[in-house]
Image (cartoon, rainbow, N blue to C red):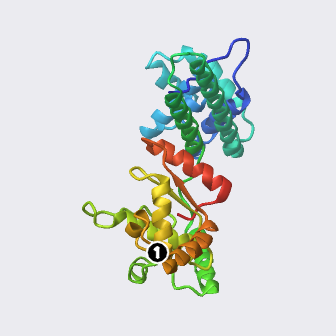
Amino acid sequence: MVAKESVPSGAMLPHDKEAEQGVLGAIIHNNEAFYQAAELLEAEHFFSPAHRELFKAMQGLTEQQQPIDEITLGNYLKSRNKLEQVGGLVYIAELVDLTPVTANVLVYAEIVREKHQVRQLINAAQEIASRGHESQEDVQGLLQEAENVFLNLATNAARHSYAHLKQLIVSNFATLEAVQDRGDDLTGLPSGFTQLDEMTNGLQPSDLIILAARPSMGKTSFALNMARYAATERKAPAPVLVFTLEMSKEQLAMRLLCSEAGVDSQKLRVGNLDEFEWDKLAAAAGSLSEAQVYIDETPEVTPLAVKAIARRIQAEHGLGM
C-alpha cells in the first residue's frame, strides 16, 4: 500500500506555498543553503509540481558543481524542456524577490517537510478507508498493510542520524554513572549466566542476539531462563516480551514455572510430583505472577506484527527485553 498525494474531493491538501518559495529563493541567494535544505528535503516533499522541478534542477546543478542562479537554473530547465513548466524565468526571478531572509532556510524546510508528512497521513488514511469499504478485502492483510504504512511514515519522520561526539560522550558517561551508582559490573541486562555476562557485559539494549544450535539442544530453555532472570532476579526487574511460534503460551508458562521452582517439567506433565515439589511450585508461582513477562502466540506472526506488538507493549508497560 502506497500513500499517493491525491487531492480529496472539494479540499486542497495541506501545504505552504510561501515556505516552499522561501526554500528555493534562499538557495538561489546562497547556494550553501542547498546543503542545509537537503538534510530535510527531497523533491517529493514539495507540493507544487513547479517547485519539485526547481529543487531537482538545483540538485542537478549541485551534483555538476555548478552555481545556482537565475541564469544557470533557466538554462538547466530549458535544456530539459521544463522551463515553461515552472513558470519561466519570470517566476525564478520572483523567487529571489520573495525571499528576504536566507538564514531561515531550515525553518522553511521544516515547514515544507511537516506539510508533506501531514499529506501522507491524510492520503494513507483515505486509502485505508477506501480499501476497508471493499467487502472482499482480507481484514488481517489490510491491518498489516495499514500498520506498515504508518510505521514507515513514523520512521521517515526521523531526521538526523548523526550526533556530535560530545553528545555521545555525555550519553556514555550517564550510562557509566548509572552502573556505578547501581554497584553492578554490567552495563546491560544480566542473563543469569555469569560467564556469558562477563563476555558480553550484559544484554545491551541495541543488540540483536541470535541463539543458534541444532534441534533439541536447549535453545528454548536457555532463552526462557534469560527472560525469567531479567524479569525476576535482578535489582531492577525488566519487562520481557516473548513470542512463541511452536509451543503454546501455556506450555511456555509451565516451562518458566518449572525453571523457577527447580522442578522437572516431565514429572509435572505426568502428575508425579511429591509434596516438597508442590510446595516449591506454589512458591515459584507466587513470585512469577508478579514478574512482567508477556507471552504472545500470534499464529504465523510476521516481522511487521512482531514490531507492532512490541511497540504497543513498550508504550503500555515498557520493555527491557
From the viewer's perspective, is residue 129 above or below residue 159? Answer: above
Q: Secondary structure at mark 1?
A: loop
Please give left or right for residue 224 compared with residue 280 in the image.
left
Viewer-nearest residue: 133 or 49: 133
- Whether 163 is drawn above or below 93: the answer is below
Considering every residue shown, the one lying at the far left of the view is: 214
In the image, taking residue 271 as reference, residue 178 lies left or right, namely: right
Front position in the image: 111 or 181: 181
Residue 30 visible in the shown view = yes
Question: Residue placed farthest to the top in the image?
Answer: 10
- Circle 1 residues within 10 Å: few <14, some 14–19, many ≥20: many
Residue in the picture at 63% in, 33% down:
24
List x then y, in percent, for residue 200: 41, 76
**For the image shown, how many numbered marks are present on the structure?**
1
Left/right placement of residue 233 relative to residue 210 reads: right
Across and down, in percent, residue 12 comes to 71, 18
* Residue kind at label 1, given as amino acid type: Ser
Residue 122 x %, y %: 66, 27
Residue 166 appears in the rendering: no
Q: Residue at 24% across / 62% down in the picture?
A: 214
**Residue designated by label 1:** 191
Residue displayed at 64% across by 68% down: 290
**How far across and down, in percent of the image, does residue 21 sit?**
68, 30
**Looking at the image, which is closer to me, 176 or 263?**
263
Q: Would residue 41 be found to the left or right of residue 103 on screen?
A: left
Query: For the point 48% across and 66% down, which residue is it?
Result: 256
Closest to the observer: 195 or 16? Answer: 195
Q: Is residue 169 above or below residue 116?
A: below
